[in-house]
Image (cartoon, rainbow, N blue to C red):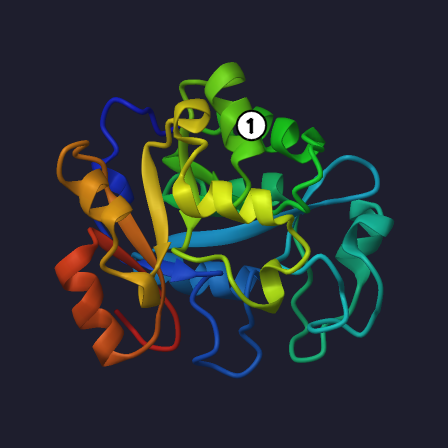
Amino acid sequence: MGGRSDIGWLTARPIAHRGLHGLTPGVIENCPRAFTAAIAGDYAIECDVQPTADGDAIVFHDATLDRLTQATGRVDAHDAAALKRLAFKATDDRMITLAELFALVDGRVPLVVEIKSDFDGKLALTRRVAGLATAYSGPVALMSFDPAPIAWLKDNAPDLVRGIVAESHYAGAYWAGLSPAMRAELAAFAHMERTDPDFLSWRVADLPSVATERYRGSLKRPVICWTVRTDDERLIAARHADQVTFEGYLA
């Protein structure tokens, strides 16, 4: 596993958002071809994991199947074997588990794994991911928008590299389901003592920010930014971050 004493590997190469996808027909996000393409380009890989009904970690971004697959409903209503059989709308690739992704990458490039969360206090997915990451010999970092999984990692798997995915305001429809108190805690970084993240993954549109300048300055910890797609965003990232999570071009 990638240790916390030296995480220079985290910022050494651009990070392909959900793998290197969208440039070739049939290569879609979080699928094996996207990961293979990222490895071929010597890019680090960012991916997302969701829980399955049988307690596994499946590599998939959304909580529901509707956007990308020919099925509907929640991902966590299905076990891993059923999810791996589902057909996508735009590729004949299939979902893989996090264990299968680790086997595919096999330490050739760094992995940055986002633990998805409904902010409901459930930590079974975090425990599963931490167990797999601890056994993995390649460089890997774990992150989440939700402070609870990162606080759990701090207390229970302190040797794993951990980060917070963040933005400045937590406004808009995506965050409407969170309480005002939770949105305020996230925006104020009030969880800092509980989470003590090794890095931040920050929304590029919200750079620069006080939090990221402090991280890079007094704390000497890296900031990566998401999701960089345009020339203007690349310039912002070059000034205010240590690496990009990119999509839609070859970095």
Image quadrant in which the N terminus is located: top left
Query: Can residue 78 be seen from the camera position used here?
Result: no
**Above/below status of 231 relative to 135:** below
Which one is in front, 168 or 35? 168
* Residue 135 located left or right of residue 53: left
Seen at 50% across and 16% down, the residue is 155
Residue 229 as seen in the image, left or right of residue 97: left
Would residue 168 be visible to someone looking at this image? yes
In the image shown, does 216 or 243 lie closer to the viewer? 216
x, y percent for residue 127: 63, 26
What residue appears at the point 22 percent right and 70 percent down from the top-left corner? 234
Residue 165 to residue 174: above or below? above
Snapshot quadrant of residue 7: top left
- x and y percentages locating residue 208 in the rendered image: 22, 59
Q: Which residue is drawn at 21% across and 54% down?
A: 241
Front position in the image: 164 or 44: 164
- Quarter of the image where one finds residue 65: bottom right
Tag 1: amino acid: Ala
Residue 24 against residue 35 in the figure, above or below = below
Residue neighbourhood size for the residue with mark 1, other residues' Cα within 10 Å, grouped as few (<14), some (14–19), many (≥20): some
Q: Which residue is drawn at 39% across and 71% down?
A: 247
| Disc 1, SS | helix
Q: Residue 167 at what x, y percent from top left? A: 41, 55
How many numbered callouts?
A: 1
Q: In this view, does 78 lie to the left or right of 214?
A: right
Locate the C terminus and report the quarter of the image it occupies: bottom left
Where residue 151 appears, as percent x and y from the top left, is 51, 26
Q: Mark 1 points at which residue?
A: 130
Of residues 166 and 178, the one drawn nearer to the viewer in this rendering: 178
